[in-house]
Structures are given as structure tokens and as C-alpha cells.
Amino acid sequence: MLTMKKSMIAFLLGAFIFSGQQLASMQEQALPSDTKDKTQKEKAPEEFIITKEDHMHTLKVKTNDILQIRLPENPSTGYSWKFTRFDARYFELLNIENFIPSNAIPMVGQPGLKVITLQAKKAGTSTLDLLNYREWEGAGNAIDQFSITIAVVDKVEDEVKKEK
């Protein structure tokens, strides 16, 4: 009697596992083939944080990748980072945060960061140049500069890296 119960349990368990495998197979077959390919091939854009230490470097990214430029700034002195070279064919300006305080409690006169967010939109190479100056004194009196060359590639297989 005990052997018969064990056999029955083994049979039911096997039938249950087999039906689960059949269901999974049917669900996979029901997906359009282009849906399966997209989930395997598509990759979310990467986000790159670019800082003052990246000045005069080259960065290789893919189209649609997000670039966030973070530069030290203290707008209470009147100085502010401004683009002197920006090619809208290669980049879309997503956002400019004029001042993010360096302390959790904002205080008048404290330094912080200017954060500029861009998205790479077209393959090619372009240089981004920024100067830190007072608007009323002009770019000729800038106290700091920042330049980075961005190589945008289309292919996912191309390696994304920073170069000196």
C-alpha cells in the first residue's frame, strides 16, 4: 500500500513538472520574435559623471548615453561656468542645475557644483569647452577653464572608456 502511494505521488509530481514545462514553452512561443530579440539586444543608456579631473581627456560613449558634467562653482562671487563650445548636432542639453551646495545645510557664500546633463545623440567626435567667468567681465577674464573631447559611437560592441 505504501509503495502504491509513493508511486502515485511520483506520477503526479512528474505530471505537474511536465505541464509546467509545457506552459513555459507555450508562453515563450507566444512572444513575437522581435520582442525576444529586443530584450536581449537593447541596453539602457549608461551614465557618465565628468568632473574637473577629466579636463583635457577624451571620453568614448555610445549614442543615447547620459553625460553629467559636475564642476565646482560659487555663484555668490559672480563666477559661473558657461559653454564656449557646444555642438548641438552631437548632444542634447537635458538639464542645468545652476548650484548644488557642498553642505547639507545651504549657507550664503558656500561653494558647490554646477551640474550640466547632456545626452549623446549622434555618432561623431566633438569637444565641449566651458569657461568660469563673471558675465559683466567677459570670457577674456575667466578664472578657470574646462575642456573634454567626446567620441560618440553607434555600435554596442565598441568599448566605452576614458583615455588620456
Image (tube, rainbow, N blue to C red):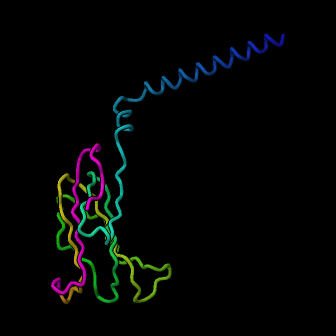
Q: Quadrant of residue 18?
A: top right
Q: Quadrant of the C terminus?
A: bottom left
Residue at the far front: name it: 164
- Magenta span has 88? no
Say left or right for 9 vs 158: right
Does residue 13 lie above or below 71 as drawn? above
Front-lying residue, 32 or 75: 75
Nearer-the-camera pick, 62 or 57: 57
Residue at image position (48%, 27%) is 27
Q: Quadrant of residue 61?
A: bottom left
Q: Position of residue 134 (x, y in %)?
A: 24, 86
The range drawn in magenta is: 138-164
Which quarter shows the N terminus?
Answer: top right
Q: Which residue appears at 32% of the width and 70% of the height?
A: 53
Task: Name the spot of residue 95 as percent of width and height, x first.
Answer: 32, 67
The magenta stretch spans residue 155 = yes
**Percent x, y of residue 48:** 34, 60
Q: Nearer the viewer, residue 4 or 53?
A: 53
Q: Is residue 122 left or right of residue 116?
A: left
Residue 2 position within the rendered picture, expressed as x and y whole percent measured from the top left: 83, 13
Q: Give residue 70's quadrant in the image.
A: bottom left
In this view, which residue lies farthest toward the right? 1
- Which residue is depicted at the point 34% across and 78% down? 72
Q: Which residue occupies the foreground of this view, 147 or 82?
A: 147
